[in-house]
Image: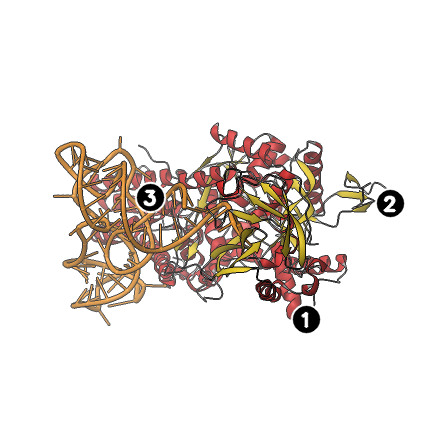
Amino acid sequence: MDESFLKPYDPKSEESKVYTLWEKSGYFNPDNLPGNRPEKYCIVMPPPNANGRLHSGHGADITLKDILIRFNRMRGKKTLLLPGSDHAGFETQGVYEKKLQKEGRSRFGMNRDDLYKEIYDFVMDNKHIMEDDVKKLGTSCDWSRNTFTLEPEIVSKVQDTFRKMYEDGLIYRGKRSIHWNPKYQTSLSDIETDFEERKDPFYYFKYGPFTIGTARPETKFGDKYVVVHPDDKRYKDYDNGQKFEIEWINGPLTATLIKDEAADPEMGSGAMTITPWHSAVDFEIAKRHNLDMEQIIDWQGKLLPIAEEFTGMRIAEARPKIVEKLEKKGLLVKIDEEYTHAVRICERTGVVVEPQVKDQWFVKMEPLTKMALESLDRGEYRFLTEHHEKIFRHWMNRPLDWNISRQIVWGIRIPAWFRNKDSEQEEIIVSKQKPGDDWEQDPDTFDTWFSSGQWPLMTLGYPDGKDMEYYPTDVMETGSDLVFKWVPRMIMFGLYLNKKVPFRDVYFHGMILDEKGKKMSKSKGNVLSPIDLADEFGTDATRMSFVVANPPGANMSLSKDKVRAYKKFANKIWNISRFILENVGSETPDGNTNLTDSDKKLLEKLDEETKFVTEHIEKYRMDLAAERLYHYVWHEVADIILEDSKEILNGPDGVEKKSKQRTLYVILATSLKLLHPFMPFVTESIWQKMGNEKMLMVEEWPQHTN
RNA sequence: GCGCCCUUAGCUCAGUUGGUAGAGCAGCCGCUUUACACGCGGAAGGUCGGGAGUUCAAAUCUCUCAGGGCGCACCA
């Protein structure tokens, strides 16, 4: 008997030994797996962002994937769990800029290459810490294939994709209304923004013969178009294009009436003025009618000279002063103080974004979303949760073109070159090489999702790497917040570049919430780190708590009590093993042992458990499989089977005792196998102490007979 | 405003072709029983959010109301 069995299970001392053993075996790499494995099984890990440590979301993510991988590895498949990390462009640069701010520095004015180098070093340091975290969770991923989105090979391939899409007419450069983050000085795509409910005064002003409403008087300096609905009876005597002389903020101007269906007759007076430069809706109206556009607010969020005496003021400062001026001029009709509306903010930084008109690179989404939806209709991939399929379809049915250029240095440089930029003779060449001396490269980088959308392809060596044999992968398991961001992009890039979706099943796990069902956040102080939990209760316990009661698609509450319960379970398994090994003796009874009827029944029950666990993992119901195992091992094997066996084991040698020994041994070995994907450390540790030659990790998954 | 999801024991949740409810945690009462006090045994706890309907039968299907959450749109 191994001496460590005499003490309670100690995760700390066992886990590191076991992980080293696994790593040394080389079995994380599918090329080294024993036996003939014709069937492949591959999961690409969502690249954790290389700018911080693992949080509970990652914990759930990694645990679920590793369970599937370990299960399939034991079932004799050639399994690859592919690790990697993402540079997470804007997010990482934001994190770094905050760091700079703390040091009293700023990225503005910094040399591009110096800034890039600094962030690169910062990310490399974090990346290694994060990779250690991933190992700590027992992840059986193939580190020899570890990749990073800014590796030259990947950068080059992502740039190739851009060129191909440009040549295919799927990418264009255009001056369009974009979301501008004035603090961080970059444009953002729709999905990188959120809405925040705000209560702001809503002002009604006299605009010639009309009354118009706005919450943003500071944008109104240049408003010279008033828009009404073509069917609005109140304005039936006015003609489209009719001109008026009116008095406005900074004096008289000539206004033009426009009839457009965008105006809602139900809203206030039914008349609105438009500011095409600072509103996406207004921009569209202006484009339809070929109207002038003028910038009112600069890139820093300050008013431009058109605002005359308000020039240079920030919005918050200027707004009340402008209202005051209009009131003095007798143009203020009324103020609605109860007005609530949603303000668009930058999802990462919380900064209110300003619509601006800017030349940017866009991906034409419609052909791509169409391709993805048709593939879904053909059943080439499926969502495990119907709910998410609905959300996905809804989103894919309104394909807004995707702004992929970011004005930050931390990312993959857009391979485009300009000559005579911003002039009438502007020329563009898309190429990885500089076309000539008088060409300058676009300073912008790609939106992170442009590269991570190609992640399954790039990591598997698209177009002709040998790992492409794993494409398409088996399942994409990720957080439901990525239902728009990441999943559709991977599907679209996969279909576009390689004609096949990158994965068959899409599994969304929910958010990990605290014990009261609230979102974990640093400011609330309710964050549970998977690494801290693993330190305190053991990795197996932590993994179990990420699985049980965590069905596909639903959020999950996590508490220390829950993890503590599974720490006790790990110890229980430990003690069951000790008891059985002590009583079975050194020579294990073999398969030819005659079994008593009651022992045969116990093995039939074991068979049922095997069946349940196997089928539920196949159905991605790891939550139910884990719960069932917990119940079986503790309340059936320990509480009933072991208790009932004591009398026989303590009795005289004979057929009955031999049968019991054989049965208990089979129950133990099978239970350890079934538990292994969920609790890899304690089970492997026991397996080793049992004197088995093969590692549990590559043992054969138990067969069930019915 | 449009759409989606959820509501089962104190807490977190199972209950997937309709057959009068289950688990874990917490709590309660006993027990140093020779694998384990990170333990063992036991008891208690729910008119399955409210209402109506379909059915021999509803937690499960339909409608409706209430509460909670999410997505989309909205700086007219």
Q: Position of residue A430 (x, y in %)?
A: 76, 39
Colour convention of the picture: secondary structure
- Which label belongs to residue A666? 3
Chain ID for label 1? A
Residue located beneath label 1 in the image: A104
| Front tag of 1 and 3 | 1
Q: Is residue A656 above or below residue A196?
A: above
- Image mark 3: chain: A
- Residue type marked 1: Gly
Image mark count:
3
Q: CA distance from mark 2 to mark 1?
A: 37 Å
What label does residue A438 carry, if any? 2
Q: Is residue A346 visible?
A: no
Q: Which mark is residue A254?
A: none
**Depth check: A226 or A285 in front?**
A226
Please say if A329 is above or below A706: below
Local secondary structure at mark 3: helix
Determine the residue positioned at 36% across, 59% down: A562
Q: Are marks 1 and 3 on the same chain?
A: yes
Badge 2 amino acid: Asp
Left of B11 or right of it: where is A97? right
Earlier sequence position, callout 2 versus callout 3: 2
N-terminal of the pair, mark 2 or mark 1, is 1
Assess whether mark 1 and mark 2 are in contact (beta carbons under 8 angstroms).
no
**Does residue A246 appear in this view?**
yes
Task: Say whether residue A245 is left or right of residue A263.
Answer: right
